Image: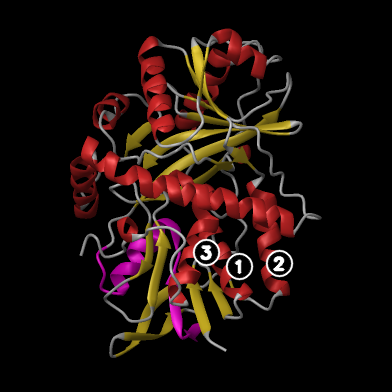
């Protein structure tokens, strides 16, 4: 039986283990934490084939510079003397072009559609498990003419690439959200999007994998790797060495640090996001993005999660309540009939999203080593793209034809 050691027990690592175990591999997952605070557990849980444009795109630089001067804005970079930060920003700047967007769209679209399909299969195969999976679409809500123009242009772009998109008037938005007294100029509705409860998904995967014999080693810090020729023979941790025929690095925002131990250049920064839950009264019906505020809204029955911000930082622990205030202040501006208390600090979740400078994930084998694969760099799309990533890694590891084209996701593109 062939064996695989997966570095990282977040949603990408779990789905990779899921598909590998289905194929009979012996799998060990190493995680530096205890699996209770994965970056994906507290996120919006959106499955969004509509998100076909990478984070690095025209206009984002100008917006980012404007947001940098507000402590409650959607985007912030912690200024610090850090060569890797400077390199990442330069690469991001170079990637934020129309040409890069046009190149990336087919890859992201196909990856997203594959993921959506795999989620539907997962729900069908485990019908007795409640993942909170619902196909209620996604609303892109806007209050200004400038944002409206951008969203309508994007709706046309999405249609050109075969996705369904509906441009809505304020009245059209209110028909889909009849209870929250919507205060918007309009919206775009993507009926093909879906959402689920990320905490339920995570709990199911961990339990299922344990029942399949997958071994979990928690609170294990990766110190180094043991090499033999062009192969990695073992992962060296503070809890011992773990050998496998293959190694998959799915360590989220720490993947760049792990890659350096493997002598690979993989630009990666952590983009901190925050979220909190509130009582869902009056009931918000559908997931939404508040476009000017860059806030995600996901209803989970009698609760609703609000999340957002992209805080480029290497600080994984602290909570910046000014960032949370930016999220909270935006809610009533769009949902005129909805109000909620500002959350206490202990009620705020935060997580570091793994951000590549070109907005594309790293998926597949690296040429540096004969038996090392990566699955990381999904930014805000970890939940959305996780099943497809795990499936693709399993396919390429088994030398099968990949379900979708992967060359844009090469882990070696910056080497």
Q: Quadrant of the C terminus?
A: bottom left
Q: Which mark is residue 391?
A: 3
Q: Position of residue 307 (x, y in %)?
A: 54, 34
Question: Circle 1 sits on which residue?
Answer: 18
Q: Is residue 165 above or below residue 101?
A: above
Image quarter (top left, top right, bottom left or bottom right) of the N terminus? bottom right
Q: Which residue is mark 2?
A: 208
Q: Please indicate, yes or no, whether residue 48 appears anywhere in the rendered image.
A: yes
Q: Within the image, what quadrant is residue 158 found in?
A: top left
Residue 153 inside the magenta-drawn segment: no
Mark 3 or mark 2, earlier in chain? 2
The single residue placed furthest to the right in the displayed view is: 128
- Residue 253: within the magenta? yes
What is the crowding at mark 2: few (fewer than 14 residues within 10 Å), some, or many (at least 20)? few
Label 1 sits on a secondary structure element that is: helix
Of the image marks 3 and 1, the number of the one nearer the N terminus: 1
In magenta, the rendered stretch is 239-265
Q: Name which quarter of the figure residue 232 lies in.
A: bottom left
Disc 3 element = helix
Q: Is residue 97 visible?
A: no
Name the secondary structure under disc 2: helix
Work out how far the residue at label 3 is from the one at label 2, CA to CA, in angstroms: 17 Å
The image shows residue 177 at horizontal and vertical percentages of 66, 18
**Label 3 Cα crowd, 10 Å radius (few <14 / some 14-19 / many 20+):** many
Q: Contact (CB < 8 A) between labels 2 and 1? A: yes
């Amino acid at each position: 039986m062939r064996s695989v050691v997966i570095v990282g027990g977040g949603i990408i690592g779990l789905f990779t283990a899921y598909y590998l175990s289905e194929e009979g591999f012996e799998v060990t997952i190493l995680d530096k934490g205890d699996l209770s605070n994965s970056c994906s557990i507290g996120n919006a849980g959106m499955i969004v084939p509509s998100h076909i444009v990478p984070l690095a795109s025209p206009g984002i630089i100008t917006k980012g510079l404007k947001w940098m001067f507000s402590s409650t804005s959607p985007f912030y970079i912690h200024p610090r003397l850090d060569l890797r930060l400077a390199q990442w920003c330069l690469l991001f700047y170079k990637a934020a072009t129309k040409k890069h967007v046009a190149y990336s769209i087919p890859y992201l679209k196909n990856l997203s559609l594959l993921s959506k399909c795999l989620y539907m299969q997962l729900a069908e195969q485990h019908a007795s498990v409640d993942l909170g999976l619902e196909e209620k679409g996604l609303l892109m809500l806007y209050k200004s003419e400038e944002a409206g123009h951008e969203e309508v242009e994007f709706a046309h772009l999405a249609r050109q690439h075969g996705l369904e998109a509906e441009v809505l008037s304020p009245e059209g938005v209110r028909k889909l959200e009849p209870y929250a007294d919507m205060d918007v100029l309009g919206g775009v509705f993507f009926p093909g999007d879906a959402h689920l409860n990320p905490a339920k998904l995570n709990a199911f995967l961990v339990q299922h994998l344990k029942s399949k014999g997958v071994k979990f080693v928690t609170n294990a810090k990766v110190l180094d790797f043991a090499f033999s020729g062009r192969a990695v023979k073992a992962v060296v941790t503070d809890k011992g060495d773990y050998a496998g025929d293959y190694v998959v690095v799915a360590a989220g925002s720490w993947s760049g640090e792990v890659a350096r131990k493997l002598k690979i250049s993989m630009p990666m920064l952590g983009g901190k996001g925050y979220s909190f839950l509130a009582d869902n009264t009056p009931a918000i019906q559908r997931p939404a993005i508040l476009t000017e505020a860059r806030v995600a809204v996901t209803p989970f029955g009698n609760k609703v999660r609000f999340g957002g911000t992209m805080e480029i930082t290497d600080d994984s622990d602290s909570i910046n309540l000014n960032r949370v205030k930016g999220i909270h202040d935006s809610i009533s501006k769009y949902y005129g009939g909805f109000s909620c208390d500002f959350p206490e600090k202990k009620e705020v979740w935060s997580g570091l999203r793994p951000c590549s400078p070109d907005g594309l994930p790293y998926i597949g084998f690296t040429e540096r080593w004969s038996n090392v694969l990566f699955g990381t760099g999904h930014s805000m799309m970890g939940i959305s793209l996780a099943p497809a990533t795990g499936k693709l890694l399993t396919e390429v590891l088994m030398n099968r034809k990949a379900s979708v084209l992967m060359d844009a996701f090469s882990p070696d593109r910056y080497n």
